Amino acid sequence: MTVPEDAAPARTRTAPDTAPRQRGLLLLLLVTNSSMLAVYMGVGSVLLPTQIAAVAPDDKVLVLGVIGGVSSVFATAFNPIAGALSDRSGRRNPWILGGAFASLAGLAFISGVETALLVGIGWCLVQATMNVYQAAVAAVVPDRVPITRRGTASAVVGLALPVGGSVGVLIASRTADNLPVGYLVLGGIVALAALLLAVCVRDLPRGRTTSGSSVARRAKAAAFLSALEHHDFRWAFIGRFLMMLGYFSVVGYQLYILEDHVTLPAGLEPADAMAVLTPLSMLTMAVSTLVGGMLSDRLNRRKVFIAASATLAGLVTIVPVISPTWPAMLVFSALSGLAFGCFMAVDTALVTLVLPRAEDAARDLGVLNIANAGPQIIAPFVASMVVTLFSGYTPLFLVGGACALLGALSIAPIRSVR
């Protein structure tokens, strides 16, 4: 999955203040983004690890790492490609519908296979097609939402993570004993959400865009990473990268952690435990996202909130190391959600303040998305290597915590923001 970035600065050249208002658009955006994150979280956190444990029980950690890493490459590649193609076509709905129904087909394919190789191929296809859907849905905000309402729209998109993540994990945990049902239900939710958006939000007339000359394309490619030459932006990028790496290294293996590391109460299965931990984490994440964002605005301070939340994310990984028990995991999930939500809310605000040039905001935020997606590619490989080499999950918690603490330190060199 790729975490949805603040949509406000993207594709600002579409003159959104002149776009007609669409009744219920924000609710539709919440539904479509939540359905997407339900698939990412439900499949990625529960159904996929469960299926891999069934088809490759002796190598489940390594296999999950390889599949997770390779599929994230597909996600990272297809998102910008699909976004550019939908720009050039001048339409969004065909890409939204095509991505959603192709994802449903991919999930149906995974539900019927019995080898790790086919599971991996299927998940790569789903990641690719879901990112076609995601890219087109994300473009609805700059197409249809006036600039004066972009902050509200971005908050709605951010709220989709706790809502969709909780729903996805609850569905997946309830269908872990019948994987085909879980895959098809989650795929069906995305398909229905796409139909609803396509029916209720018609494409605006937009001119087709051309790719330009080869010289212009080379110039754009050369300029793409130039934002990293800017001191403050570079350190914000590093901090985001480290925080995401630490977070996803642990979260991606939570089901196996519950199976092999934590002592659960009698009668509580790992999948059912996930159905408790994920909503708990998402609830605290939603609260800290709102509170952290508002407080940082009121106090006009960003760095202290980011450093404090990243430090909390690093320190809380000690809890399940010291006490690999169910109560400790409840504490860990609640506090890690609290830390991650505040970090993402305030760090997104900080990044908008350290962009090198306002006219290149969309391009430079695209660079920042590497710090979101890159760790999701690396994290499965890092996590599987750590668990395999050190024969346990304690070192994984420590590595994840160290990354978050380094992310907190990376904020200190930023000079232009308090």
Image (cartoon, grey):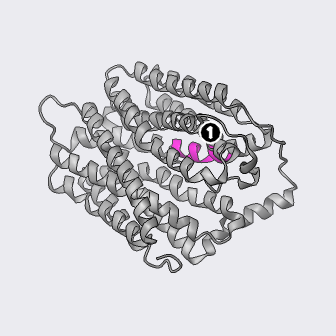
Q: Which residues are magenta?
A: 71-81
Residue 370 drawn above or below residue 237: above
Q: Which residue is mark 1?
A: 137
Q: Position of residue 393 (x, y in %)?
A: 26, 50
Report the residue at 26% width, 31% height from top.
Answer: 272
Residue 296 visible somewhere in the drawing: yes
- Residue 181 lies, in percent from the top left, at 41, 19
Relative horizontal placement of residue 413, taking residue 106 as reference (left or right): left
Instruction: Look at 51% across and 80% down and name the residue there.
Output: 415
Dominant secondary structure, magenta = helix
Q: Identify the residue at image location x=53%, y=32%.
A: 121
Which SS class for mark 1? helix
* Viewer-proximal residue among 372 and 344: 344
Q: Position of residue 46 (x, y in %)?
A: 36, 34
Residue neighbourhood size for the residue with mark 1, other residues' Cα within 10 Å, grouped as few (<14), some (14–19), many (≥20): many
Residue 145's spot in the image, x, y percent?
Answer: 65, 46
Q: Does the magenta run of residues contain 198?
A: no
Quadrant for residue 43, please give it. top left
Q: To which quarter of the image does residue 82 belong?
A: top right
Amino acid type of disc 1? Val
Residue 246 visible to the viewer: no
